[in-house]
C-alpha cells in the first residue's frame, strides 16, 4: 500500500511529464539568460542562445556548471535575483577553499518543502508520526530542510539537531518518536549509546522509520541497521546546491525518486561529460526546473550513481537514482586502481565479527601507495586468542582483495577504538595529500 502526497503529479504519465519538463526547461533557460550575468556570459562563450533550446534533446548543448563556479562567484555572483527576493541563505563549509552560498526565494522554500512532503509520504509517514530531526540546524541544509517537509505533512517535529546523544534517546522514548532523520553513522552511534543506557531501540522505543543520508552508505549497512533495530531504514538524497535534502526512496526501497517536474537528471561519464548508457554508473548532473534565486543548469554534483527511468512499482513515474556509490572526489586512486570507500563498507558489513566502525588510511612509501584499513570488531568478534584473530584478519583481507582488486593492510582493533561522528563520518585519511 502506498499513499501519495500529490497523486496527480507523482503518477503523471511519462509523455505528459516530458512535456512539462520541456516547457519548464525552455522557460528556465530564458530566465537565467535574462536574469544572471553569469549564465549570459557562459551561454555566449558556448555560442548558445535560449532560442537554441527547443526540446529536451537540446539539453546537452548547454554548458556545465560546477561547485567551483559557486566558489569562484562567492558569495552570490551566480544568483538570478537580487537580495530583496531572497528569504534565506544556507552556507556549506569549505573543505577545499571558500564556502559556497545558496539562496532561496519564498517560492523556492515552498518547492523544497513540497518535494520532501511527497517523499516523506512515500515512506509511509504522516500526521500520526513524531519525526526527530537529528541533522544539523543552521547553515547546513539538513535540519531546516527536513523540518519544513515534516511539518508540511502534519507530523510532529522534534528539532533536536546533532549531538547530545543521551538526551536524544530520552526524548525519543518520552515523546514517542516514530521516525528519526540523521546520518547512518550517527544512528549506529546512537544505538551503541542506547545499549549502554540499558535501552533497546527495538523494544523500548516506538522508532519504526529511519531517514538516513548526508553520507554514502551501503545496502549491507541498511541490512545491519534493520536487523539490529527492527526499523525500516530509507535513503534520503539532496545536496545544498540543489536545495538540500529533497528526495527519498519509497517503501519499495528500489531507488530514490527524483521529482522530474522539479529537476532534470543526467548521468555522465565523469571524464568525457558524455551521457552514459542507461543502467551504467556515472556522475549525477541536475538542471533545476523550478528554482529561482539560484537556478542551476547542468550542475555536476560529483556524486556517482545510476539512473533508472522505468516507472516504479509504487505507481510513481518519476525517474529513480540508485544508492550513491560515492563522490568523484571521494574516489581513491591507489596504485592506479579506483577504490570507493563504499566498496570497503559493503565488504566489511557482510562479515559478522566486524563492528559498525572502520576507517581507511592511505599513505605513500617511496613511490608505492599503501592502503590500511582499520576495522573495529564487535564484542563477540574480538577474541583473546591470537590464532582466531589471525584467521579473521586473513579472511577480511581476502574478502577486500576480491572486491577491490588490490591488497590492503588490515588492522583489527578493539570495540570503541575508532572515532564516532555526530554529523558526516570522516572515514578516509589520505596522508598523501597532507
Ligand atoms: Zn517507488
Image: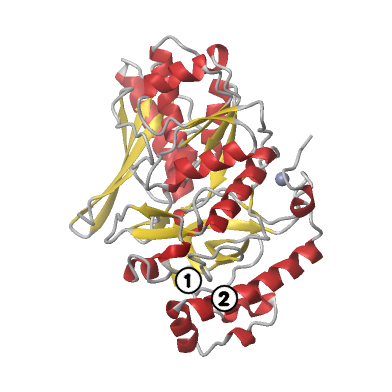
Identify the residue at horizontal 36%, vertical 53% (top origin). Answer: 92
Q: Is residue 413 visible?
A: yes
Q: Position of residue 416 (x, y in %)?
A: 31, 23
- Residue 80 numbered tag: 1
Ligand 1 contact, mark 2 (Cβ < 8 Å): no
Quarter of the image where ligand 1 sits: top right
Residue 112 versus residue 287 in the image, above or below: above
Q: Nearer the viewer, residue 371 or 285?
A: 285
Disc 2 on helix, strand or loop?
A: helix
Q: Which of disc 2 and disc 1 is earlier in sequence?
A: 2
Q: Quadrant of the C terminus?
A: bottom left
Is mark 1 in CB contact (under 8 Å) with mark 2? yes
Residue at the front extreme of this rendering: 84
Q: Nearer the viewer, residue 192 or 46?
A: 46
Residue 29 versus residue 1 in the image, above or below: below
Q: Position of residue 154 (x, y in %)?
A: 64, 34
Q: Position of residue 250 (x, y in %)?
A: 68, 41
Q: Quadrant of the N terminus?
A: top right
Disc 1 on helix, strand or loop?
A: loop
- Residue 248 numbered tag: none
Q: Mark 2 sits on what residue?
A: 31
Relative horizontal placement of residue 102, taking residue 221 as reference (left or right) = left
Neighbour tally class for label 2: few under 14, some 14-19, many 20 plus, Cα within 10 Å: some
Amino acid at each position: 500500500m502506498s499513499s501519495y502526497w500529490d497523486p496527480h503529479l507523482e503518477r503523471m504519465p511519462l509523455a505528459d511529464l516530458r512535456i512539462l519538463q520541456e516547457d519548464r526547461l525552455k522557460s528556465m533557460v530564458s530566465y537565467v539568460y535574462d536574469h544572471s550575468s553569469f549564465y549570459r556570459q557562459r551561454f555566449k562563450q558556448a555560442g548558445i542562445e535560449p532560442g537554441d533550446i527547443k526540446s529536451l534533446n537540446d539539453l546537452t548543448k548547454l554548458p556545465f556548471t560546477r561547485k567551483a563556479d559557486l566558489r569562484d562567484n562567492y558569495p552570490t555572483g551566480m544568483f538570478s535575483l537580487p537580495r530583496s527576493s531572497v528569504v534565506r541563505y544556507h552556507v556549506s563549509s569549505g573543505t577545499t577553499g571558500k564556502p559556497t552560498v545558496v539562496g532561496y526565494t519564498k517560492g523556492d522554500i515552498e518547492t523544497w518543502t513540497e518535494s520532501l512532503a511527497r517523499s516523506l509520504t512515500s515512506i509511509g509517514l504522516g500526521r500520526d508520526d513524531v519525526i526527530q530531526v537529528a541533522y544539523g540546524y543552521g547553515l547546513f541544509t539538513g535540519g531546516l530542510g527536513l523540518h519544513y517537509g515534516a511539518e508540511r505533512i502534519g507530523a510532529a517535529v522534534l528539532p533536536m539537531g546533532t549531538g547530545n546523544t543521551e538526551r536524544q534517546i530520552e526524548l525519543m522514548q518520552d515523546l514517542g518518536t516514530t521516525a528519526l532523520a540523521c546520518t547512518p553513522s550517527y544512528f549506529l552511534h546512537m544505538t551503541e549509546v542506547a545499549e549502554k543506557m540499558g535501552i533497546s531501540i527495538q523494544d523500548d522505543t516506538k522508532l519504526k522509520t529511519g531517514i538516513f543520508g548526508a553520507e554514502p552508505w551501503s545496502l549491507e549497512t541498511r541490512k545491519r541497521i534493520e536487523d539490529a533495530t527492527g526499523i525500516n531504514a530509507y535513503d534520503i538524497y539532496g545536496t545544498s546546491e540543489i536545495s538540500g535534502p529533497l528526495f527519498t526512496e519509497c517503501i519499495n526501497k528500489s531507488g530514490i525518486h527524483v521529482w522530474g517536474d522539479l529537476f532534470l537528471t543526467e548521468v555522465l561519464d565523469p571524464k568525457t561529460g558524455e551521457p552514459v548508457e542507461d543502467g551504467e554508473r556515472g556522475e549525477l548532473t541536475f538542471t533545476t526546473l523550478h528554482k529561482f534565486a539560484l537556478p542551476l543548469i547542468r550542475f555536476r554534483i560529483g556524486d556517482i550513481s545510476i539512473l533508472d527511468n522505468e516507472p516504479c512499482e509504487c505507481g510513481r513515474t518519476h525517474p529513480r537514482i540508485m544508492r550513491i556509490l560515492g563522490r568523484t572526489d571521494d574516489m581513491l586512486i591507489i596504485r592506479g586502481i579506483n577504490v570507493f570507500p563504499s566498496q570497503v563498507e559493503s565488504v566489511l558489513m557482510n562479515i559478522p565479527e566486524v563492528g559498525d566502525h572502520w576507517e581507511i588510511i592511505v599513505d605513500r612509501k617511496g613511490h608505492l601507495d599503501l592502503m590500511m584499513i582499520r576495522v573495529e570488531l564487535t564484542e563477540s568478534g574480538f577474541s583473546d586468542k591470537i590464532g582466531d584473530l589471525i584467521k579473521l584478519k586473513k579472511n577480511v583481507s581476502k574478502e577486500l582483495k576480491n572486491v577491490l582488486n588490490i591488497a590492503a593492510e588490515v588492522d583489527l582493533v578493539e570495540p570503541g577504538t575508532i572515532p564516532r561522528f555526530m554529523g558526516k563520518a570522516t572515514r578516509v585519511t589520505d596522508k598523501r595529500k597532507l
